[in-house]
Image: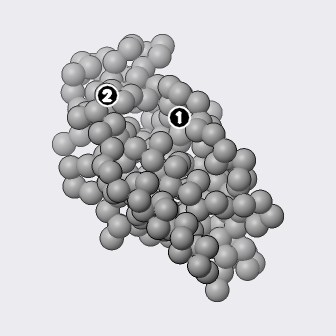
Amino acid sequence: MHTRTLTFALGLSLLAVSSANGQVISGAMKVTGVEMH
Amino acid sequence: MAREATARLYDVDENKVALLRPKRLDRYTHGTIKFQAKRGKLIDLDKLHESVWATRLSKGTRSGLVSLEVTAVGSISGGSKQPRLDIARSNAFFLLQKGKSKQERAAFERMIETVRRDGQSQTVSVTGTVDGWGGVWPSVLKKLPRKPRRIIVTGFQVAP
């Protein structure tokens, strides 16, 4: 759990800056292996 | 985790990120993460890739990326042989490809016909599947898909 929180914090810090070279206005990512609870 | 990775992107409207699970097969099933940019912003696919990579999704989970479909707005150039979509308010572009299905071919041909008839300067919205974005974790995350980015056109409309 601690590792996961740390990972999220890392991702947040990496991505806090807005991109000046964006490409898309929306999207849909199809994924497999979604864990059901 | 991929949903959270998408939602925390600066340019993504976190209130419009949704995980849709249309069909329950077993404990591990498939789903679609829908996302949308904040008003006036554009989402960078490199940043999206980087964000999902940061989750360190690993093998052995029977999970992966099936496909990524995006919608982008801009103007089309390059003619019918290799059309490209130049993104409005950005230096980015997509090379546009014709797909194999009947629906994909129809969308592509409608796009080419519209541009030929009405000219290249108009603003259009193109939806398509991004080439190279697919595979199981973690191999799909190890390196960025090739550039220039190509999308297989699945939908097209002249922007209002």
Q: Nearer the viewer, residue B59 or B82?
A: B59
| 3D distance between C-alphas at marks 1 and 2 | 20 Å
Residue B9 rendering spot, x and y as whole percentages: 39, 57
Q: Nearer the viewer, residue B15 or B120?
A: B15
Q: Quadrant of residue B117?
A: top left
The residue beneath circle 1 is: B152
| Whether residue B158 can be seen here | no
SS for callout 2: loop
Q: Is residue B39 left or right of residue B24?
A: left
- Same chain shared by disc 1 and disc 2: yes
| Whether residue B15 can be seen here | yes
Residue type pointed to by label 2: Asn
- Residue projecting furthest to the right: B60
Q: Is residue A33 left or right of residue B79?
A: right
Q: Quadrant of residue B123?
A: top left
Residue type pointed to by label 1: Ile
Residue B29 rendering spot, x and y as whole percentages: 69, 71
* Residue at x 41%, y 59% (from the top left corner): A13
Q: Is residue B136 left or right of residue B86?
A: right
Tag 1 and tag 2, C-beta contact below 8 Å: no
The residue beneath circle 2 is: B91
Residue B76 rendering spot, x and y as whole percentages: 33, 24
| Image quarter hosting the N terminus of chain B | bottom right
Q: Chain of mark 1?
A: B
